[in-house]
Image (cartoon, rainbow, N blue to C red):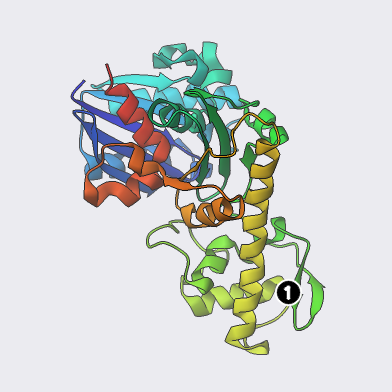
Amino acid sequence: MSMVIGWDVGGAHLKAARAEHGRVVDAVQVPSPLRLGLARLKQSFAEAKAAIGSAPRHVVTMTGELADTFTSRAEGVESLSRAAADELAPGEVLLYAGRAGFIAPELAARHVEDVASANWHASAALVGRRLGTALFMDMGSTTTDIVPVVSGKVAARGYTDAERLATGELVYTGLVRSFLMATRDRAPFAGAWTGLIAENFANMADVHRILGTLPDGADQMGTADGREKTVAASRARLARMVGRDAADASEAEWTLLARSFAETQIRMVTDGALLVLSQGTLPANAPVVGAGIGDRVLREAAHRLERRHVPFESLLEVAPAARERVSQCAPAAALAAMAALP
């Protein structure tokens, strides 16, 4: 198929990537908080289609079935499958069911466990086709995938979210949406360890904004307090985590506190990778393939693991202007590329 669009329906964002004659020419991410219901998803599809255009064929993966909009994952898979088929008509629509391959949306109820949160599998499968053996890692706004790929095959021990959490192949830390209170239970401040207030006063987007490591356009959600997305406002939110106001300490002190949370995140990802590597399935020279808005964090993790870092987008034929967006929309881009293959 000469033109195809890959879609990744998440709980917070909708991502799409367009391939023409096997070359990924564009990718887009739009906010799509499913907690606001399917009407919000419909709006997000409209925004994404306006940005990326139409195609005769669409391939869809998802993680949004976990949203509390749905009473069960099965309900979520079926609802999102119907929504995608409706919004992408009259084009042909196929769902990515991971180990079961591509299926028609009307078969979603029979393949709930295969379709649910299978976006990581699409990216890892593409890595297998293009590189053979690697540790694939993708840090998005909320989570980090850590997937071994061996001799062209996805070698993950887990498949469902529950299984992957248990094996270290899914780590719940992301560059933007992770709550600081969930990353650690104390932090160094003013020469002492201090407990953290267990409220959603700040998130990792605030940390990376303070440190200057937040990519442009990566933070598409509202802030914890509804105020602006500035460094000063992020310092104020961070200060609340230790029961203070921003005026109670210097900018340098708040930067150090932010750095402590960033360091914790790197360690969480590195520990997950070490757990996966401890299976012994990957050779010592297998590189880390990094993707997502948090690839800067993954580069540091690869350095600590003493492994070469390979950008995910380098494995695809990609229009130069779309390279960064393709990395940030890796599952959608992988689907578009694979669907274009004979």
Name the quadrant of the N terminus.
top left
In the drawing, does residue 59 fall left or right of residue 139? left
Q: Is residue 86 visible?
A: no
Q: Secondary structure at mark 1?
A: loop
Relative image position of residue 73 (x, y in whole percent): 60, 26
Name the quadrant of the C terminus.
top left
Nearest to the observer: residue 83 or residue 256: 256
Relative image position of residue 251 (x, y in whole percent): 58, 85
- Residue plotted at (58% across, 77% down): 235
| Res. 161 image quadrant | top right
**In the displayed structure, would residue 1 be above or below residue 190?**
above
Residue carrying label 1: 242
Relative image position of residue 260 (x, y in whole percent): 67, 69
- Residue plotted at (47% across, 52% down): 295
- Is the residue marked by circle 1 packed among few (<14), some (14-19), or many (20+) residues within 10 Å? some
Nearest to the observer: residue 255 or residue 104: 255
- Residue plotted at (64% across, 77% down): 256
| Res. 135 image quadrant | top right
Relative image position of residue 126 (x, y in whole percent): 41, 29
**In the displayed structure, would residue 1 be above or below residue 334?**
above
In the drawing, does residue 300 fall left or right of residue 248? left
Nearest to the observer: residue 276 or residue 40: 276
Q: Is residue 287 visible?
A: yes
In the drawing, does residue 293 fall left or right of residue 263? left
Give the amino acid at mark 1: Val
Nearest to the observer: residue 45 or residue 333: 333
| Res. 9 image quadrant | top left
How many discs appear? 1
- Residue plotted at (51% across, 51% down): 141
